[in-house]
Every structure is written in C-alpha cells, then in structure tokens.
Image (tube, rainbow, N blue to C red):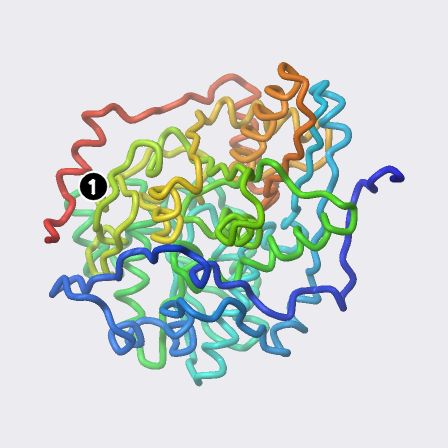
Amino acid sequence: MSKVPYRIYLSESEMPKQWYNLRADMKEQHDPYLHPATFKPVGLDDMKAIFCEELCYQEMNTTDRFIDIPEELQEFYKMFRPSPVVRAYNLEKVLGTPAKIYYKFEGNNTSGSHKLNSAAAQVYYAKKQGIKRLTTETGAGQWGTALSMACAHFGLDLTVYMVKVSYEQKPFRKGVMQTFGAKIIPSPSDTTEVGRAILKEHPGTGGSLGCAISEAVEAALKTPDCRYVLGSVLNQVLLHQSVIGLEAKAALEKVDEYPDIIIGSAGGGSNLVGLVAPFMMDTLNGTRKNTEFIAVEPASCPSLTRGRYAYDYCDTGHVTPLARMYTLGSNFIPSANHAGGLRYHGMSPAISKLYHDGYIKAVAVEQTKVFEAAVTFAKAETILPAPESAHAVRVAIDEALKCRESGEAKTILFGLSGTGFFDLNAYTSYLEGTMSDYIPTDEDLEKGFATLPKVE
C-alpha cells in the first residue's frame, strides 16, 4: 500500500448526515437524572423549563441509533467541516516509535475547538422553537466563543457566565465573544442570587464551571423567552459531537486503518465521547474486542480517577438536576490550572457508566507534564495545542513510547480538540519555569465528598 498521506480528508458529500446515539448500543443505561427538590426522576416537562424541547427529546432518547442532522445545520457545518485526520509522521520520528499516530484536528474554526459542533445544533433548535435569547457558562472560553458564533449566525442574544479565573487568564477570549455580540459576565458574580451566595461563602474565589452553570440556569429561568444551553456532560451534547468520531472512522477506512488505542481529554466528556463513540459502537456490538479507550483528565481535578460514583448536583448552587456520575462533590473548587475546560467537578453520566463498567480507562496527568508534551507536539507538528487537548497529546506520547520499548507497531488515534493561541500566558509560565503542579490531597477531596447528597 502506498504511503498514507499526512492529512486525510473527506469530501462534503461524505460528511455525516446523521449523529450517532451511543446510548442506543449501551448494554445498561446510566441512572436517571433526579429533580433537585424531590430527588424523583426528572421527566420531559421538568427539562423543558430549562432546555429547548427537541434537545430534551434527544437527551432522553435511548433507542434511536442514528438521528438526522437537519439540512440547514449540515450547511452550517460545511463552513468548517469535515475536519482532517492527520498522520503525525514528524512526531513519530521525534519519538522514535514504531507506533502509527493519528489525530483528529478540530481547531480549524474561530472558536479554536470542537465546541461549535454542538453550539450550532443547540442554537438551531432554539431558533426553531422561537426562543429569543440563551444563557450559558464557559470555562476556558471555547464553548462561549462557539456559542456566540452560532447565536450571531442564527440571530439570538447570548449571555455567557465565564469562570472568573479563566476570564482573568484569557482576556482576549472576551473580545472574540463580544465581537460576535455576546455579553460576558465573570462568575461567580453579583448579578444572580446564587452568585452572591457563592461569593459570600467563598470570598475571592476564582470560581468553577459548577458556579457558572448555577448562574446561567438561574438567569435563564428568570428571563422571558430564554433557555439555558450546556457545552458538555449532557447526552444531547455527546450526540452532536459524534460527528468527530464518524468522520475519523470514515477517514481511517480510506487508508485501511483502525485504531488500537483511542485517547481523548476529559472534562465533562463531550470531546472524548465525540471521538470514541462510533468506535465504541463496534466494541459494544462485539465486532471489535481489543480497542483500548483512554480518558485523560488533570491531576488537579481527577473526577474519574479519584472521584466517587454517586448522585450529585451538576452545579455548585444546586439548582440543576442530580446525575449519577463520577464526582468530586459539587462544592469542589479546583485549582487555577490552565486547562479551564477540564475544571469540572463531575463527568458525563454516560461516560461514568461506561468507565464504571470497564469499557474506558482513565489517566490523570500533572499540568507541567501536559505542557512538556504540548511543546514537543508543537515543534514536531507545527500546531499549538490547547491545554485541554494537550492532555490527550501527553498520553498519546506515553503510549507511543511504550510501543518503542515493546517494539509493537500499534495504531494510536487521539483528539486534538482545539488550539492554544489564547493560552500563551500558560505556555510562558511553563517555559519560564514558574508553572507548578497542584494535586489535591485525600483530605481536600473528602471535603467535597462530604457534601454529596444523601440519595436512597
């Protein structure tokens, strides 16, 4: 066979016309969401008060394996999709590994990340329902940027509650979101009741995604013609992101490749499941048995590797439904590491279930090791990865080095979910030797576990 090209592209006609619903193939479903006031299972009517109707149906759908992507949304996708699968020949050479390394690159749009896949879908359904405005949270800013782009395209107003520490670390993200017409509020703020309560209990806090979610939900519930949208964790988001893995699978089929190891960074879960879902389908259906799926999270916020599998609130203010997931406790405030998109206290219920049942492995890595890998990758492949994406880069390099030691020529696929051009302060900190690693102690984690709700 001739040499695999550096970049493997699909044509527009080969783009996915349907999303893949992983839950339709799961052997067991994750436990139901619970109402925060009654601890009873949440129904569609409960969800419709917060989310758009069609997204509620997608959230609860466990039977349809494939769901049509609306034609108008397919046209929007064509502005930045399909995205390439890249053979990392130069990285392989630098590492001296017999492994074949591929990455799915999602950074070729202004948001610099995969987030636009779901942002466009959620805004499309809001517009279709007649919703006039949306609220959301954002960590590092990729989701807020993506949503501001989609809202500008479809003509909806947007308010973004941005985690305060990221708001301060990444001021230019604010400028990009404002360019597309979004209003940005650093969270926790004094604009909501829950924000004021969090500030009273934790004065001077840099915030967390859980805090920002609470504020965005409260604002949505109190604003006419408004709904809340979320960039990760939920089943509807995992569904929309499946275009990543569907494209990756189709591209690799063109060169007769199938990965032995698939690696994704994991904060709430959208990037990870988006990449692995179509391959996980083969594992669940028994057509492939030896594929290894690895979720990579920061050692500073280790929900999978050190969290509890329990019911917990999805936000700090306890206004959202409870989910059974791997969690560090809704009051856990992670350290101000630079991977803002991975600073969430919990993990997607679907991923948590797959991890609990042994389908997915998890690895936690320190941020200095993450940036070491990011610099190695950037020099070899000429792309500056986002800190979140660099977690997957770190473990891909580690797995390739294992292949060098064993002599095995495994095929590795990882998700390069975004670019790091708004993270230069972090790169500077690493290069100047001022970056530190924070790993919570068992005592630190126990404080979060102590707040877990008592659900029978």
Image check: 398 left or right of 448? Answer: right
Between 228 and 9, the residue placed more toward the observer is 9
Please count the marks in the image. Answer: 1
Between 374 and 58, the residue placed more toward the observer is 58
Q: Residue at x 12, y 53 (%)?
A: 455
Quadrant location of residue 381?
A: top right
Image check: 156 left or right of 98? Answer: left
Quarter of the picture containing the N terminus is: top right
Q: Is residue 407 visible?
A: yes
Quadrant location of residue 222?
A: bottom left
Image check: 79 left or right of 273? Answer: right
Residue that protrudes farthest toward the bottom in the picture: 130
Where's residue 114, x and y in %?
Answer: 57, 53
Q: Label 1 belongs to which residue?
A: 203
Name the element at disc 1.
Answer: loop
Where's residue 347, x and y in %?
Answer: 35, 47
Between 405 and 344, the residue placed more toward the observer is 405
Quadrant location of residue 13?
A: bottom right
Q: Is residue 174 visible?
A: no
Position of 228 relative to 167 (above/below): below
Q: Residue at x 39, y 40 (%)?
A: 358
Position of 106 relative to 69 (above/below): above
Q: Residue at x 68, y 73 (%)?
A: 75
* Amino acid type assigned to the residue bearing label 1 in the image: Pro
Where's residue 35, x and y in %?
Answer: 19, 65
Q: Residue at x 15, y 65 (%)?
A: 40
Position of 35 relative to 433 (above/below): below
Q: Residues within 10 Å of mark 1 (few under 14, many from 20)?
A: few
Residue that protrudes farthest toward the right in the picture: 2
Where's residue 437, x and y in %?
Answer: 40, 22
